[in-house]
Image (cartoon, rainbow, N blue to C red):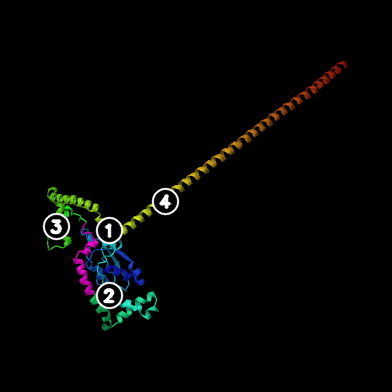
Amino acid sequence: MAVAMLRSRLLSQPALRSDMCRTLSFAAAHPHGASSLMTGALTAPSAPSFHASSPASVRPLVKISFPSPALRSDIVVVAPLAIQKRDKAQLRDPERPKRPASPWLQFLADFRTQERAKSLSHKEIMPTAAKEWKALSPDARRRFEEPYEMQKKRYDALFKEYTESGKKDAWKRDPAKPKKPLTGYFLFLQDFPPHPELKLTERTKLAGQEWKKMSVEAKKPYVQKAADAKTAYEKSMKAYKASGKEEAWKEKVGIAATEAKRKRRREHQADAKKAKAAAAKKEKQAKAKATKAAADAKRAAKKLAANTKAPAAKKEKQAKAKATKAAADAKRAAKKLAANTKAPAKKAQAGQAATKAKAAEATK
């Protein structure tokens, strides 16, 4: 309840929302953490340390530091993670008494209804109301404090009755659900001497050291007892699940609806992931097909170019050979012509020489 009131109180103040998100870490459980936070009484130095041996109900808690002067610095929010998750997963028990609004919240609600508040912006309402609340005299505050005290007494009585009736625990955990058995070590821890002079953490550490030193035979009674308890637990859980009591309890407290919603979200995410994978595969196949088509086109173009180039080269070669042959033939014809022309001239020259020699001989 205090955590829910704190959440609504913080989220109603825009000036604090950014501060609220500045620092997020882990701290240990504190029995009055949420209520202390509402009053600003709990600070980090007073928060106990977290130990791995702590029960699951008091495991990691959320710590939020508020550097803003509007709240005490380094305030620790000590709502266990299990409760935070349950706030989201479960409905609120309609039979659980509602905590009355504090005098400040009642004053704030009254302030919002006044005419002067209507002229203020959302950001101005909170600081203005806080300033007026601080300036109120004790007599003026009684108008809000006295009704609250009466409401608080009635709430405390009703909440005590609600808690003692077992309804509170029954809403958090199905009373019909079998409890998980302890391990051999925790059974040993129950028999371990109390050591009142030691802190709980020191006693647990000492017990852990003793357990490690024990032989297998010494551990056997605890291990066997734990194994028997586990067998009985599994049998009881099987019967519990088969009875339908778990589904009925989840339906009652709202977990069934939350689980169904989460299941639908997971299915939607799985479908989206599958569709994305299919689209990626299709795109990959299309890309591979396009690459293959481009390669085929390139090979075809190369082949076509080769087929076109070969006949032209052959034709060019033939033309070149023909030209070479024609040139050779022309050369031979010219040579023959030259030879045919030179022989008669030589013969005539020889005849002239013979005639001349004959003439010279006759002159003698």
Counting labels gives: 4
Image coords of residue 87 (percent x, y): 29, 63
In front of the other: label 3 or label 4?
4
Q: What element carries label 4?
A: helix
Say which label, 1 or 2, has the lower sequence index.
Answer: 2
Label placed on residue 275: 4
Q: Which of 199 and 228 is in front in this view?
A: 228
Say which label, 3 or 1, has the lower sequence index.
Answer: 3
Image coords of residue 18 (percent x, y): 35, 68
Mark-to-mark CA distance, 1 and 2: 33 Å
Mostly what secondary structure, the magenta segment?
helix
Image coords of residue 208 (percent x, y): 17, 55
**Residue at 31% from the left image edge and 57% from the top image edge:** 259
The answer to whether any part of residue 285 appears in the image is: yes
Q: Nearer the viewer, residue 165 or 299?
A: 165
Residue under circle 3?
Answer: 190
Say which label, 3 or 2, has the lower sequence index.
Answer: 2
Quarter of the image with the C terminus is top right
Q: Position of 185 compared to 258: left or right?
A: left
Q: Is residue 206 a member of the stretch shown in magenta?
A: no
Mark-to-mark CA distance, 3 and 4: 54 Å
Say which label, 4 or 2, has the lower sequence index.
Answer: 2
The amino acid marked with disc number 1 is: Lys
Question: Which residues lie in the magenta part?
Answer: 152-176
Mark-to-mark CA distance, 4 and 2: 52 Å
In front of the other: label 3 or label 1?
1
Residue under circle 1?
Answer: 250
Residue under circle 2?
Answer: 102
Identity of the residue furthest to the right in this view: 363
